Structure formats: C-alpha cells, structure tokens
Image (cartoon, rainbow, N blue to C red):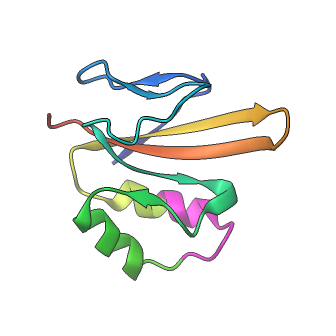
Amino acid sequence: MKIVEYNIETLYSPINGELIINKEELNHEATTLVGYWIDAAFENPFLKNDKLKEMWDSFECGFGNYDKFEDFLSSVDENWICFKMCNSGISCGHVTTWFILNLNL
C-alpha cells in the first residue's frame, strides 16, 4: 500500500468524493474508509475490515515505533491507499493520523 503525506485538514475520498474528515467531523460511515490510526491512541485503531484487523492483531511494533508501523502498512497487498495527515491542534499539539482508503469501489 502506498503512503501519501497529506497536510491539509480536510480529506475527501479520491474515488467517490465523500467526506472522510474535516475540522468538524470524522465520517466513520464513509464507504471507502477501511480504518485509521491516531498516534495518541495508536494501540486502539478504528478498523472496518476484518482482514486488516487480523493483520494488525498479529503485528507487533511497540508504541511509538512509527517507522516499523509504516513498513507494516507498505507491506499490505491490497488496492488501498494510506493518507498520513500531520496536523497541529490548539489543545492537543501535533497529531498524526493514518487513514486507509479502499480504491476498489
């Protein structure tokens, strides 16, 4: 899977144009959203795909080992894309989120 760094606060699906995230909401129901990880809650990702859940459950990288985590994402052999969003918020400081989108819809 390809990882694309994306430093804008709004993300729309490149497949169907549906909103994935903006400043006001995160669309968990987006049809192209496979899952996401937030660095502050890294061990508790939101995953909608059973195959990805199984792969994640068998993967051990240790909290904060983001290079190894990104190697894991790159090794996923699906027609998906990862948008890595690095943003800073007023109350929480720097936040990195990895959004996985399905390109097969």
Q: Residue pushed farthest left?
A: 105
Give left or right: position of 32 versus 62.
left
Give the image location of residue 65, x and y in percent: 65, 67
Q: Which residues are magenta?
A: 61-70
Q: Nearer the viewer, residue 7 or 45?
A: 45
| Residue 6 place in picture, x, y as percent | 55, 29
Examine the rendered structure and indicate whether residue 51 appears above or below residue 8.
Answer: below
Q: Is residue 57 above or below residue 39?
A: below
Does the magenta-highlighted stretch encompass residue 49? no
The residue at the point 28 percent across, 44 percent down is 80
Q: What residue lies at 51% left-to-right and 46% top-to-bottom?
A: 98
Query: Does 34 sit left or right of 36 as displayed?
Result: left
* Horizontal arrangement in the rendering, residue 85 relative to residue 29 (left or right): right
Where is residue 39 drawn, in percent x and y? 65, 55
Left or right, 46 with respect to 97, comes to left
Q: Quadrant of residue 9?
A: top right
Q: Quadrant of residue 81?
A: top left
User: 39 or 71: nearer the eye?
Assistant: 39
Q: Is residue 65 within the magenta segment?
A: yes
The outermost residue toward the top is 17
- Does residue 10 sit above or below 85 in this rendering? above
Vertical comparison of 105 with 3: above or below: above
Tally of numbered discs: 0
Q: Quadrant of the C terminus?
A: top left
Q: Residue at x 43, y 77 (%)?
A: 59
